[in-house]
Image (cartoon, helix red, strand yellow):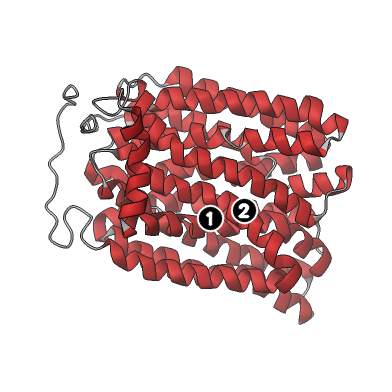
Amino acid sequence: MSARPLAAEPTGSSWAHRLGIPTPLAWGFIGLTIFMIGDGVETNILEPFLSTDHGFSVSLAGTLVTVYGVAVAIAAFFAAALSDLWGPRKVMALGAAIWIIFEIVLLAIALPSDSRALIFLSYGIRGFGYPLFAYAFLVWITAVSPADRLATSVGWFYVAFSAGLPTLGALTATVSMNLIGLGFYSTLWVSLALVIIGAACALVGVRERIGRAPLVSDASDVTATLGAGLRLFLTDRRARFVTYIRTINSIPTYAMAIFFPSYFTDDLGWPLAWFLILTSVIYAVNLPFNPLNGQLGDRFGWRRSMFWAGSMFCAVTVALVYALPLILTKAGVADGIAFAITLVAGALFGIALAGFVPLSPIAVALLPDRPGAAMSTYNLGVGAAVAAGPALVALLHPLVGATGLVVTFVILYLLSGLMTLAFKGLQPGFDGVPVQEPLTSAPSPH
């Protein structure tokens, strides 16, 4: 049973085509950006909100986000397989519905009643929402992009994704609370409105036909379709490495959202707004480097560029983001100057995070006739990071503090670099692998 063959990107002079974005999916990128802005609003305000208004400790907040992350990991893994089975558009619609319904339960019932059980339940189930929406769209991208532009197209996915979570999401929270004067709770209602708008843009605006149907030729074989990704993960060491590396890539994003607010306010004596600004800078700078790193990987090699621009660069820069402000403040440097230098380190870290963009086409290359199943190993890593980051905070912060956590991040990035060495021989045009000729059209499934 084989997947629907990939169609070549139509030629033309549209702005999307010139940028390397699959033209039929342009509205999907816009909708994804708005959706993820809404999802990202809470990233850096959830822990302060729960501790201030609902009596949560840092550890309990970390536990809540870990539960949420487990749901994200499960949904991220099955988003790809379900996209093979149903088509990416239906999976995106399901994800949007879950997000919206359970956010309403959280905001309208759980938080006003201050029921911790209902908070955990509604927030946890809502965790299934955004991965189904976002990563089904990522599968859609891999299904319609030509092989020689795949990493570039994936890079633009991460521009849209990271523009929302957490870049513009954090900025939206800052504007809502500090300029408009809304509180934590009202700002969360703003996030719901943005998610609804983003979902509508993507689901109504995208007319591309391949993603509206199953991506495998025999969608009736449910067990084989859903189990293909799991079999790949269990039988291919490289597929497991894809999952591990993708988890490591994003662990600091979700862990820092839990313990960096208290690090800024308690250890450095800086305002919480400065952490929100740092987050916005990290991921704003990250945005243009996602497609650039995709182009770098397409030209010089996915494996080589990821090792240097991703793993090694991240190991250095994540240490700088933590250590520089601590060293400078203890040396008596003025807070404003120390913060400005920290922003530079944050910008470098944002560039480094983009170095992992080539991992998506590497995942697809492991099982090219089943792009959804191949991407499930990648998506599992994305979701696992949402759980692993807060879990590391909950487990290690009481034992080794912020310093120990950052040292752990550095070690993990170095390990990811070692794992990239296993990906030799996967990229067309490199290491003796023949270049694939793009199809002029997508034949009917067989």
What's the residue at 45%, 37% (across, down)? 78
Image location (x, y in percent) of residue 68:
64, 43
Q: Mark 1 — residue?
A: 250
The amino acid beneath tag 2 is Tyr
Label 2 crowding class (10 Å Cα cut-off): few <14, some 14-19, many 20+? many
| Outermost front residue | 223
Q: Is residue 20 visible?
A: no
* 143 to 90, vertically: above or below: below
Q: Residue 40: name its quadrant.
A: top right
From the viewer's perspective, is 202 left or right of 332? Answer: left
* 393 to 210, vertically: above or below: below
Helix or strand or loop: what does disc 1 sit on? helix
What's the residue at 75%, 45% (across, down)? 46
What's the residue at 69%, 63% (across, down)? 395
Q: How many marks?
A: 2
From the viewer's perspective, is 329 left or right of 436? Answer: right
Which image quadrant: the C terminus? top left
Asked if the residue at tag 2 contacts the one at tag 1, i.e. Cβ–Cβ closer than 8 Å, the answer is: yes
What's the residue at 22%, 54% (across, down)? 427
Image location (x, y in percent) of residue 422:
30, 65
The amino acid beneath tag 1 is Ser
Q: Residue 347: name its quadrant.
A: bottom right
Q: Is residue 132 visible?
A: yes
The disc placed on residue 343 is: none
Q: Residue 83: name its quadrant.
A: top left
| Distance in Å between CA atoms under marks 1 and 2 | 7 Å
Q: Mark 2 — residue?
A: 254
Image location (x, y in percent) of residue 27:
44, 26
Helix or strand or loop: what does disc 2 sit on? helix
Image location (x, y in percent) of residue 403:
68, 73
